[in-house]
Amino acid sequence: MSIFEYNGSAVVAMVGKNCFAIASDRRLGVQLQTIATDFKRISKIHDRLFIGLSGLATDVQTLYQRLVFRHKLYQLREERDMKPETFASLVSAILYEKRFGPYLCQPVIAGLGEDDKPFICTMDSIGAKELAKDFVVSGTASESLYGACEAMYKPDMEAEELFETISQALLSSVDRDCLSGWGGHVYVVTPNEIKERILKGRMD
Amino acid sequence: MECVFGLVGNGFAIVAADTSAVHSILVHKNNEDKIMLLDSHKLIAASGEPGDRVQFTEYVQKNVSLYQFRNGIPLTTAAAANFTRGELATALRKNPYSVNILMAGYDKEAGASLYYIDYIATLHKVDKGAFGYGSYFSLSTMDRHFRSDMSVEEAIELVDKCIVEIRSRLVIAPPNFVIKIVDKDGARTHAWRQSVQDVTTASV
């Protein structure tokens, strides 16, 4: 079994009309055994920037702590929040630093940039950025997620419709993956508010 | 075949661990206490390589005491758990410790809590957790009978159910267990469950 599949994870982000949604599953496992069904994979960096980390849970936690540290330092020096594009470059640089002994995670970054324009990107475990205009996926259920998102996505969805779409894509994909699931955690972010919702899916 | 498990009840947390010290096919002793008192209101139940287990848990214990000496107040359970995770994470890519930890503690504000810390430094706050081959039996038994806010008597009944399950279904099941509890009155040994005792008198 690959080390990326040790804990099991699924993360997806989608772009809507002046908003974005980022969602993840909630399972924390150790190979075949489920340890917890309330593991947080998506973290807020600031009110308009979220990062979802899939892959090995210990590196998810370590990397998240390092990124929060770097962002807080940036906030102290620059007296403002980081732009999503800048943050993505920061994550990419931090991951490439460990090129020959990498953090075993794949981040999904979603944020609202200038003029409330949504930004999403993903990268592999050594920081190769992949920008997309529609959706990005990562985790053990990524192949199913690609298919589900491609089928269900349409551009310029409003927040409510975007929530429905991303939730259906996530739940149907993790149902085909034994290592991810046990519900979902969805954040829908518009310029005015952040809506956090827990999904109840197949609990198996 | 080390079995460690624990659960959180109404204002208390209980951890149980087997007490065999084994080297290949030989049982060195069967009253080895694997649950260490971290401070007055914290317990650390550890399983894994014997040298690492003792060395690492003593290291954590001494650092927790040092914090209390320096700052005049004890660490919270969450802080101690995060410190432990940090040490495991730092050592992970240099000189990893092979120790799995269940940390139970009681804080005035947060109440009783239980933290699951993997040997690769995955940290998660749980209501019930287990390590080792015994976890396949104890986790399922706890999933069936656990309710939130159980009384001490109910929790001990559940712990005993798990011990019975481990003893009957695990091929080289450890014969003896120690059960420790932590609540507002502190951390202490609650009971031993022994089916094999050490013979101390030599037969002539």
Image (spheres, rainbow, N blue to C red):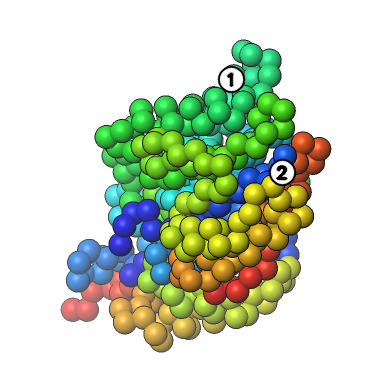
* Relative image position of residue B154 (x, y in whole percent): 67, 77
User: Where, quadrant-wise, is the C terminus of chain B in this rendering?
Assistant: bottom left
Secondary structure at numbered mark 1: helix
Residue A186 at what x, y percent from top left?
67, 54
Q: Going by the picture, which residue comes out furthest to the bottom? A: B168
> Where, quadrant-wise, is the N terminus of chain B in this rendering?
bottom left
B183 w.r.t. A48: above or below: below
Q: What residue type is labelled 1?
A: Leu
Residue occupying the far front of the picture: A155
Residue drawn at x 71%, y 69% is B148
What chain letter is assigned to the residue under label 1? A
SS for tag 2? loop
Q: In x, y percent, where is residue A35? A: 51, 64
Give the crowd class for mark 2: few <14, some 14-19, many >=20 residues within 10 Å. some
* Amino acid type, residue under disc 2 in the picture: Lys
A31, B37: nearer the viewer: A31
Residue A17: mark in rendering: 2
Q: Which of marks 2 and 1 is nearer the N terminus?
A: 2
As measured in the structure, the alpha-carbon distance from the residue carrying label 2 to the one carrying label 1 is 31 Å
> Does residue A34 lie above or below A194 as drawn?
below
From the viewer's side, name the closer residue of B180 and A167.
A167
